[in-house]
Amino acid sequence: MKKCVAVIDTTFARVDMGDIAVKVLKRRLPGYSIRRITVPGIKDLPGAAKRMLDQGCEAAITLGWVGMREADKLSYIAMSVGLIMVEIFTGKLILDVTVHEDEAPGDPKKLKEIAVDRVEKHAENLALLLREGPEALVKYAGKGLRQGYEHAGELK
Amino acid sequence: MKKCVAVIDTTFARVDMGDIAVKVLKRRLPGYSIRRITVPGIKDLPGAAKRMLDQGCEAAITLGWVGMREADKLSYIAMSVGLIMVEIFTGKLILDVTVHEDEAPGDPKKLKEIAVDRVEKHAENLALLLREGPEALVKYAGKGLRQGYEHAGELK
Amino acid sequence: MKKCVAVIDTTFARVDMGDIAVKVLKRRLPGYSIRRITVPGIKDLPGAAKRMLDQGCEAAITLGWVGMREADKLSYIAMSVGLIMVEIFTGKLILDVTVHEDEAPGDPKKLKEIAVDRVEKHAENLALLLREGPEALVKYAGKGLRQGYEHAGELK
Amino acid sequence: MKKCVAVIDTTFARVDMGDIAVKVLKRRLPGYSIRRITVPGIKDLPGAAKRMLDQGCEAAITLGWVGMREADKLSYIAMSVGLIMVEIFTGKLILDVTVHEDEAPGDPKKLKEIAVDRVEKHAENLALLLREGPEALVKYAGKGLRQGYEHAGELK
Amino acid sequence: MKKCVAVIDTTFARVDMGDIAVKVLKRRLPGYSIRRITVPGIKDLPGAAKRMLDQGCEAAITLGWVGMREADKLSYIAMSVGLIMVEIFTGKLILDVTVHEDEAPGDPKKLKEIAVDRVEKHAENLALLLREGPEALVKYAGKGLRQGYEHAGELK
């Protein structure tokens, strides 16, 4: 049986983030089956990731969209703690990707660009880590890489 | 024995959220028994959910009402982390629904509408996920669905 | 041997909250022994609750007093997460009651009234839940019950 | 073999808090060996406490110094949650003592007094709880005890 | 087989923090193999640390770079809680080192100096603790040591 990677996004998001991730992962990880599911919002991501990993997926990428209200920020904390706990409990790799609605207030085009770029780059990261192992990113250490923005670069 | 879904709401809430959820779930999940309980406030929800799931329920929907004080916001963080931990520990599905008193300050009619709509839609989500499995919501991924408000829609 | 309920309060509190809870519980739960202990402050409550429940108590009520400093608010988050985790790990009921010093700044008489009322009502809640089971509060669901204040009531 | 209590402080602190605690504990707990270790900062305290308790200590007192930056406040949340989790997982008693640099801004003498008083009083608390058991502090319940400040007292 | 220490940094960082730590650790811990990996950002550190420790490393140093956005601060909380949980679950030592972009706004040279100094000093701390055991830092207790800044010193 093929090894499996889970892609989990939300109906709350305003960009089909899962679709973007699936495309990258299919291209970069031909040896894997990609299992995609969707949950309502960001607080549903950790439980869903846990279930997918328990069902045999080797890794997951979660794709969250964080609203502008204070409650959304607090939910972001809970989601982040939860996803980290799933990684700790399962010993498996999860890349936790989020777009925050206030990254480009009043500019939906820009916000979509951020989302697309961020998901693509982190899907590439996940594929690289699965293909080459945890040392794969050492060559980019400290390079100020950014997803959704231009790279910040290394301080001179 | 019928499979069971737990509905857990609070006496703190100002709308009978549990009743709304029960009605939807009975209609949409005729094959399930719906077990409803009520706790005082939002911080009591995770422990109650854990007990219901341990007693055999397959899934739960929790219905919280978050007050306007700073302490309520901090309690919201704890509740959210707790419910996520219950999902992680049990491997079972919990939909965590909350209404925040400050979503419609000074407008009780609007606040009630938000609560009713949000509970109904998330009860529908839960029924759909239980009937059709975790892929059921993929068709709505990235559609900017909202519960309690008009859908935000997909960014073009 | 009689079943046991733990009452845990603090030396930080400015009202003898434990005494109030013990009186209610003795009256309402004649079949239980009430075991009372006291810890220094709110961050000591979860560990103490865990030890009491491990030693055989069936449920606990914790009584915290939250100061006005920022550090107290942050401690409140930690305490709340901790008590929820104890409920999750033990599967037992804990009612987590707190009074916040800033609920009645400069009005000690009012603050004491809030504390007394809140502890009494939550001790009643605990007794009711233990006597009648988790469905006991369903009849008050969504009624906007408050402890320490007048009930907010149901939205029309 | 003698029973053991762990004293854990930091190199970040600006007062030798561990030394103060050791002196009190040696005087009050002659039957115990006092094991003292030091970690860099507050986020290192929970892991260190876990290791000391796993190595056989019966209880611990941790002595943290919280800086004035926002990052220090956020670290305080993490430390507090962590120490509570260690208590929950081990079932052992930890007294978590912290001094916050902003308790006496610009007044190092006052800040040192706060630190000394707080550590001494909590070391006394720990000794009392170990010698007499968890009921030892019931007589001070609700008395508004403070460590580092004058007692706030009971509300009339 | 040699004992192993893990060095984990990020591609988000703007200074090659891992390289700095590796150099110190190789010099100070000739008996250990140093295993270095890199993850995208700070929320990936706890899961990576858990995997390295599960694979046999005896200790880890994590090197995080915290951005200036509110989301970065919230991620910092989650990362900090996560790393503490890994220490608690594994019983192994992790030094959690972070540089915050807002420590020297608009002054990249200063920020780099902070990063270099902080990583070097904490790598020295880790080496010392591994070579000499948990009592090694007692002589610096309460000395107001700082990493990235001048030592604050002991209060008189």
Image: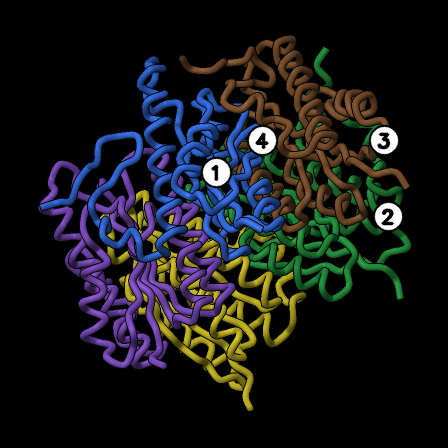
Chain colours: A yellow, B purple, C blue, D brown, E green
Which residue does the image show at 33% across and 46% down from the upper left?
A: B40
| Helix, strand or loop at mark 3 | loop
Write down the quadrant of residue B25 in the picture. Answer: bottom left
Q: Which residue is mark 3?
A: D31
Q: CA distance from mark 2 to mark 4?
A: 47 Å
Side of B78 where B110 appears, left or right: left
- Considering only order in the chain, which callout, 4 or 1, is on the residue closer to the N terminus? 4
**Which image quadrant is residue D34 in?**
top right
Quadrant of the rendering where the N terminus of chain E is positioned: bottom right
Given the image, what chain letter belongs to the residue carrying mark 3?
Answer: D
Circle 4 Cα neighbour tier, 10 Å, few/some/many (<14 / 14–19 / ≥20): many
Label 3: how many residues lie within 10 Å, few (<14), some (14-19) or many (20+)? few
Quick one: label 1, few (<14), some, or many (20+) residues within 10 Å? many
Q: Secondary structure at mark 1?
A: strand
Q: Are both tags, 1 and 2, on one chain?
A: no
**Disc 1 to disc 2: CB gap under 8 Å:** no
Q: Describe the element under mark 4 as helix, strand or loop.
A: strand
At label 3, which amino acid type do we have?
A: Gly
Q: Are marks 1 and 4 on the same chain?
A: yes
- Give the amino acid type for the residue marked by disc 1 in the picture: Thr
The residue depicted at 28 percent of the width and 70 percent of the height is: B34
Spatial CA span between label 1 and label 4? 10 Å
